[in-house]
Structures are given as C-alpha cells and as structure tokens.
Image: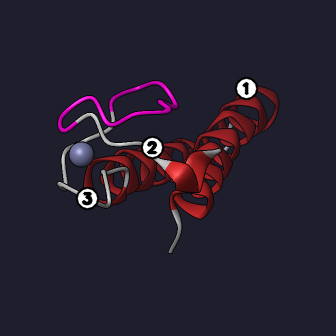
Amino acid sequence: MSLKQVQYLIYALFAACILMVVLLAFTKFIVFLWLTLAFAVAGVAVDLRLWRCPHCGGHLGRDVPKYCPSCGRRLDDLQ
Ligand SMILES: [Zn+2]
C-alpha cells in the first residue's frame, strides 16, 4: 500500500467517524456510538501502523511532509 493510499484510508476512516457522530446526534441510536469508536480506533491503528517512512520506518507525524522527519529523505510517494 502506498503512502498516498494510507493517507486516503486515514481520511476515509475519520470521515466515517464524523458521519457516525452526526447519525448518532440525529437518531440517538447507541449503535452509532460503537461505530464511531470502532472507526476512531481503526483510524488511529492505521495511522500508527502504516503512516510511516518507507526508508527508515519512522512515524510521519500529523502533517503530510515532503521529507521524513526522522531520516530527512524525500517522500516521493506523497508528491
Ligand atoms: Zn525516514
């Protein structure tokens, strides 16, 4: 999986999380609370596990960097 795909996956999981919060607010169905938590946990897990430099394996942080904050190499995949 490329870094670009990981980036979109993280965005999709947190977008789904927000959607579940909206559905929870409108419907008051408790199942949307559990789905919110599930998408949030999945988003954090994907971020921690896959949002990493392909060269050194260091975590890329919260931004979308051009260069790895750990080893300084260029992240061509994200350009
Ligand atoms: Zn690196």
Residue 70 spot, x, y in % from top left? 18, 34
Foreground: disc 3 or disc 1: 3
* Disc marking residue 40: 2
* Disc marking residue 25: 1
Sequence order check, earlier mark of 2 and 3:
2
Residue 32 spot, x, y in % from top left? 62, 47
Mark 3 vs ligand 1: CB under 8 Å?
yes
Part of the protein shown in magenta = 61-71
How many residues crowd mark 3 within 10 Å: few (<14), some (14–19), many (20+)? few
Q: Going 82% across and 29% down the picture, which residue do you hit?
A: 26
* Disc marking residue 55: 3
Question: Whole-Å distance between the Cαs marked 2 and 1?
Answer: 17 Å
Q: Which residue is more in the foreground, 20 or 71? A: 71
Q: Is residue 67 magenta?
A: yes
Q: Going 19% across and 45% down the picture, which residue do you hit?
A: 58
Identify the element where label 2 is drawn.
helix
Marks 3 and 1 in Cβ contact (< 8 Å) = no
Question: Whole-Å distance between the Cαs marked 2 and 3?
Answer: 27 Å
What amino acid does circle 3 point to? His
Residue 30 to residue 64: above or below: below
Mark 2 vs ligand 1: CB under 8 Å?
no
Residue 64 spot, x, y in % from top left? 52, 31
Q: Going 69% across and 40% down the picture, which residue do you hit?
A: 15
Question: Whole-Å distance between the Cαs marked 3 and 1?
Answer: 43 Å
